[in-house]
Image (cartoon, rainbow, N blue to C red):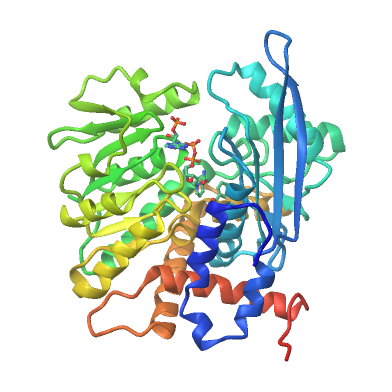
Amino acid sequence: MSNLPSEPEFEQAYKGLENSSLFEKNPEYKTALKVVSIPERVIQFRVVWEDDNGVLQVNNGYRVQYNSALGPYKGGLRFHPTVNLSILKFLGFEQIFKNALTGLNMGGGKGGADFEPKGKSDNEIRRFCDSFMRELCKHIGAETDVPAGDIGVGGREVGYLFGTYKRQRNKWEGMVTGKGGNWGGSLIRPEATGYGLVYYVEQMLKYAGKGNFSGKRVAISGSGNVAQYAALKCIELGATVVSLSDSKGSLIAEGDAGFKPEDVEAIADIKLARQPLTAYEHKGAFKYIEGARPWVHVGKVDVALPSATQNEVSEDEAKTLVSNGCLFIAEGSNMGCTQEAIDVFEAERKEKGGEAIWYAPGKASNCGGVAVSGLEMAQNSQRISWTREEVDERLKLIMKEAFENGLNTAKEYVEAKEGELPSLVAGSNIAGFVKVVQAMHDQGDWWESM
Ligand code: NDP
Ligand code: 8G0
């Protein structure tokens, strides 16, 4: 029994792993799970800043340094009013195993603040980032812990965070990723999560014998970094993107045209200005549905890509996607699907063999973002920059290998009947977990005891 306060999001992520068939076959890993589920270190700090009226404001800042078996702690920073330790622990826990699936040498971590960027001026954002990093800079570094953006933290914020670190520590080093292209950032990092997600789904389509993205109808939620570049890549590959959304509602494309690149680019500008989707004065045939997620409003789609936030697909929404003939669902967001939604998808997969919906968990399908962050770290330490093409090729290969790793691990560990598509959730969970806990075992973090 734990005496920790209730941590619903963390408990959900933990149970998702605990229920794996791995522990029946390898009971010694139960000890490893007990150890790995406690962060190596949690830093919580005060962030005091001044708003444009000269009024003092204060927020909670955090960094969860979860696991350093495979490399320096690595994972994003989230600025959102809902941020608390339960959310950062779930994100940090997932990050450990995701980073293992990239094949690069990165540990897992996550951080952020319960700060609301909406309605703030650019100067307020800069002062907040400055105050946040004045404390965080004591705990991170290129060989220690390397943050990046996440919800509410993009290129602009990463710039301010980097600047404060450099001034405070008097060091120019790659201690954060997602940096600007002309000061140490990697090409393709902004695109990486969305592109990588689409490259992963290309592998699923191919394996399932369902061709490629050309002619497919794709529902996407969110309209931030991940959703924008997932949409642009789908359009480039000949698919029709039928939805985007934000925390206030969904924009659904009517007819056959779908979103065009110029729609996505205009929405990107609106999001950079921290405005809602309703600020988009579109000329095309779109319907805005206030307060709704897209899933039950998109009709028949082939592919669904949740790309906004955790628990954004419910059991009922999962059932509607299935009954509308959706065949592929891959998470751009972290823990995008509720456990009940995953149970719906997995039951369909088991019952209906190769013609059923196939679900990919975020720790595999969205690992392209952190993978290119790993490539940014590699370029920084060698003091070189790779071309767009070079980074894109590496990203494609990493996504293919993450897919095959999950697939082959599922075939090895999970019994399946003839014609059944392997469980990517079980396979990815086991592959990431085994890699990390074997390293921890070698390093003396846990051992078999009587
Ligand atoms: P952004 O801040 O760029 O965009 C977030 C989008 O999701 C916005 O459209 C936002 O709407 C919406 N959103 C945020 N919170 C909620 C909420 N509580 N309910 C409904 N909608 C919400 O973030 P990213 O695109 O970077 O991140 C999206 C997801 O992808 C997150 O789960 C993140 O952890 C995950 N991810 C991101 C990676 C990256 O490289 N950026 C890598 C891997 C995963 P609004 O504008 O109204 O707030
Ligand atoms: O680059 C990163 O470390 C990063 C940033 C935002 C999100 C994620 C993730 O994998 O969830 C990673």
- Vertical side of 284 occupied by 346: above or below: below
x, y (%) of residue 116? 58, 27
- Vertical side of 207 occupied by 298: above or below: above
The foreground one among 352 and 196 is: 352
Please identify the quadrant where the C terminus is shown.
Answer: bottom right
Q: Farthest residue toward the bottom? A: 450
The foreground one among 156 and 434 is: 434
Residue 156 in view in this figure: yes
x, y (%) of residue 340? 36, 59
Residue 375 in view in this figure: no
x, y (%) of residue 236? 29, 44
**Is 315 situated left or right of 189 in this image?**
left
Q: Residue at x 20, y 49 (%)?
A: 301
x, y (%) of residue 235? 28, 42
Q: Residue at x 69, y 8 (%)?
A: 53
Q: Residue at x 16, y 56 (%)?
A: 323
